[in-house]
Image (tube, helix red, strand yellow):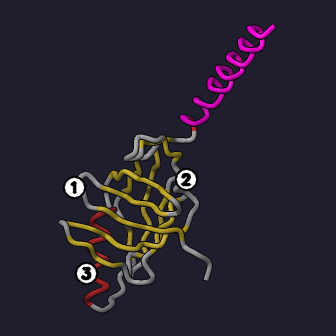
Amino acid sequence: MESAIKRHKRHMALATAALLVPLAVACGTQKADSGAVVVQEPVTGIEWRVVSVTAGGTTHRAPAPARLRIDEEGGAAGNLGCNTFSAPATVQGDRITFGGLRTTKMACDSARMAFERILAGALGGQTLTGTTVDGTLTLTNSHGDRVSLTRSTPD
């Protein structure tokens, strides 16, 4: 009788693992530094506030209006720090590809314009790797430049 119980428990554990592993893979996963599997959070349909851009080893803090939203229909829009922009965008796994940015042509102070050029250079026409952790999104391009974002909170 005891061996039948042990067999049943072993079969239940295997059946549970067989159900959970494909679900974890389908949700999108990545290896954390500790080796643990981390489930990626969605990046589309969320208003992201740009916190900073690190380019060429220098981190540049974002002005308040800098924002990004990627929709599920293949587009992105936001604010580069002064001007608004839109661009085609595709998300495939952890890869996010932005087409050329279309922007308004307003002039702002020199610090905001400088940040805008850096952010536009990091996003426009680039394929970036996106990593989400606890409400933050980090986009890294092939040059190692990073855009750090956080979920916007309603005003």
What crowding class fits label 3: few (fewer than 14 Cα within 10 Å), some (14-19), or many (20 or more)? some
Residue 106: which disc?
A: none
Residue bearing mark 1: 143
The residue range painted magenta reads 1-25
Identity, as a three-letter code, of the amino acid under mark 2: Pro
Q: Is the residue under label 2 in contact with that under label 3 (CB below 8 Å)?
A: no
Residue 103, image x, y percentages: 38, 73
Q: Distance between the residues labelled 3 and 2?
A: 30 Å
Residue 42: which disc?
A: 2
Q: Nearer the viewer, residue 51 or 122?
A: 51
Q: How many numbered tags mark residues here?
A: 3
The rendered magenta stretch, by its main secondary structure, is classed as helix
Q: Is 99 covered by the magenta stretch?
A: no
- Secondary element under disc 2, as helix, strand or loop, is loop
Of circles 3 and 2, which is in front?
A: 2
Image vertical order of residue 63 relative to residue 17, above or below:
below
Identified at 54% across, 73% down, the residue is 152
Identity, as a three-letter code, of the amino acid under mark 1: His
Residue 38, image x, y percentages: 50, 45
Residue 114: which disc?
A: 3
Identity, as a three-letter code, of the amino acid under mark 3: Ala
Q: How far apart are marks 1 and 3 (CA)?
A: 19 Å
